[in-house]
Image (cartoon, rainbow, N blue to C red):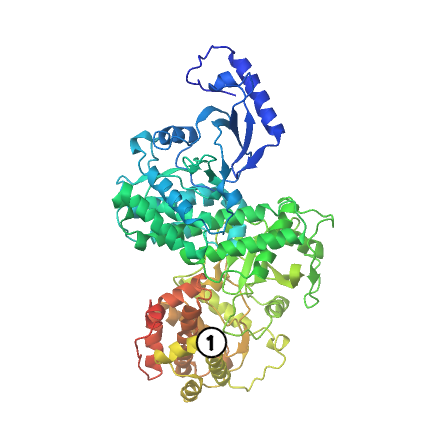
Amino acid sequence: MATPPVPGVKPEGRASRDQRRAILAAFLKRAAESGQASSGFHNQNYVLPLTESVAPLVNREPGVSVTVRVRRPKVLPVVIRTWGNEAEILRAVKSVLPHVPECLLQGQGFAIHSYVEGVPLSSVCGNGKPVDTLLMKALAGLLAEMAQVRGGALPPLPSIWPSNHTDSQGFLQTLAGMADLHIRKPNWRYFGGLFAALGLPEDALIRLAERVPAMARRPYSLLHADLHRDNLIMSYGGDPPLICVDWELATYGDPLHDLATHLVRMQYPDHQWDEAVESWAVAMQRVRPAAVNGVTKDLRHYVAFERAQSVYPDVMRAAQTLEGSTDQKTLDEATVAVRRALEAAADPLRLRNVASEPEIERILFRWRASRRAGCGAPRRSPVGTIDWKPDGRVPERSDFPHSAVGDALYLEGAVPASRVFKGTAHLNSVVRVPGFDVPVVVRRKVTEVRRRERSFLSEHSVLAAIEQSEVEVAAPRVLALGESHSKDPFAIHTYEGPDDIDQKPDHPVNGLLPHEADALVAQLLALTDVDYREVDPLAEENTPFYDWLSDQLVALVRSLPKESQQLARFLGLPDASRLKEILSRHEVSHRAPALLHGDLNPWNLVRRNDALALTIIDWEMAVVGDPLYDLVRHMHLTPTRPEIRERLFQRWSKWLDEKYTYAWRQDWQVYRWIEIVRSAYVDLDRLVTRASLDAPNVRRAVDSYRMTLAAATGSLGLSVRPRANPYLARALA
């Protein structure tokens, strides 16, 4: 180990380099064996007296207590670091805060600091407990004193730092970018799949940086950036009353950031927050008045950032406790910790539909199981397998036996984020199962999301019917159906995406190309050859499909929550009874029924490089009905240029038998109209409830809600009635 020269000790003094190494190695061993350790997340801190041989190396008397800080091996990168050398920070701080620790000697993976006499604040006033008013003022004074450390005495700042050292907005944007760079990115490969399953987007912190508003300008100063109860030592003599330790996360920037991290990490009771802020403002006003500019308005942005970036280390630390554990208590504790972190970060990161505790428990259970399996090739031994119960509706397949199902479930929890897709109703994890020729996707229902539009047919039975009919429809194959931990239902399908499963599937989000339009019509034609009675034995050929569709829309409107119904009335949309009257004015000709997909939005179409051109996925909205409806609903949900619409209709009316296309020209506008009306209600409810807004098809729909509402009310013969209410701006944003 290399040891730098110590002031006052000549390099070739009493001990040679090799002797010093041996002396320090023995001292570190003695520290580790002393048992006098306090554990930080990044360091083990040992307090012990200097030996006769070590004392000369640090210019101290033998027997004087020192703190030996030993870096923990393999620590997760979960903090933002401005500077890499704590010793340089301590030297700069010493002139203003003379009682902070002094770095006496630094080596590879360790440092010896002077020992600060006293007791940590946490040992006499634990987290969540009220802090005495005098002590709070002393804390505020300590934060204010840091502002007197000269910027020129500090180590050089990283190149990404704002050049204007009063730019508060730029500083917070830099912090968010550094949190993404130092915390999220290094851990994404290992924890990314877990983050994605929990609903944490890959670009959440980047988006947060983009949303940082303009703020008041405040002069930058030295910030401790980790001032919590464990890092505050109450001195025995009371002069000074408090001493800061652990300066390795110190930074230089807007002093409001230090106040925000202090408020959150100190875990003050709610009723003390205002008192703590006021104490800080009074103390800072005496030292640097400009630092309190805009504190009332801007502090919330730093508090939001602290809670947002904390979700990543909090989730990772909770997950780490599961590695090597098998007990339910550890799983329960990790679940509570993750739920708390997600709830705290939900608003600043704009997370939608924060997972419930049962959902989080199941996700963590799968993650833990995959770690016990070694994150590599699944074991064939039943030891440590994930218990699961097959659903008899899908019999065991010879090409994908139950052992392969177990392998897929093993691998599910360890998939990287690039192979996790969260839609409006399902969490999909893509894995490669040894011995099976194509990737598979494990599909689980997102239990906390309630879909307003009902499903009528079982997806597995629809896909089985398509496979058995051997028609030219590109659709997934159902490989297994069952339940795993906590009766969590799952389905396993063949994966219909790129051969490189780390690449995202290509969806026609901007509309179909000409050859894709032809291929889609060809598959809709092939669907008419599927015996729909296999999936819906009660389907009646003579039941008017439009009447059934109208009844379903009326029932949907009637079932909307009170808040959504109230806003619908404010905006001029009719209630369920009035809507039923309006819908009944229209009639649609009878056409022979067929199996329909029911939700041909572009994210349910995956491009492929063969004659079929498109694979159709997500069949949970399948229904038996009028084939014209499937085509028109697709054009409503997908940007469709006039020439592509004409091509679709031309091919469809020419290729399908007349019993499926009879009188389509006079009827297609009715289906288009009812879909516009449906979207006006469904998208409004999504805006009110914030449900599924992270799904791309939902996001695009609600972003264009103003046009949807205008089209719906116009086609209903009604007018929009914008009235003064707190929801209108929210709904039309």
- In the rendered image, residue 609, in percent from the top left (x then y), is placed at 49, 55
Residue plotted at (33% across, 84% down): 717
Q: State the residue in front, 80 or 626.
A: 80
Left or right position of 177 against 559: left
Left or right position of 250 against 627: left
In this view of the protein, can residue 544 be seen by the observer? Answer: yes
Residue type (three-letter) at the residue carrying disc 1: Pro
Q: Give residue 711's quadrant in the image.
A: bottom left
Left or right position of 233 against 484: left
In this view of the protein, can residue 648 be seen by the observer? Answer: no
- In the rendered image, residue 443, in percent from the top left (x then y), is placed at 58, 60
Q: State the residue in front, 58 or 20.
A: 58
- In the rendered image, residue 563, in percent from the top left (x then y), is placed at 43, 75
Category of crowding for the residue at label 1, using alpha-carbon neighbours closer than 10 angstroms: few (below 14), some (14–19), many (at least 20): few
Residue on which disc 1 sits:
561
Residue plotted at (46% across, 24% down): 104
Left or right position of 263 against 26: left
Q: Is residue 521 above or below residue 153?
A: below
Q: Give residue 722's quadrant in the image.
A: bottom left
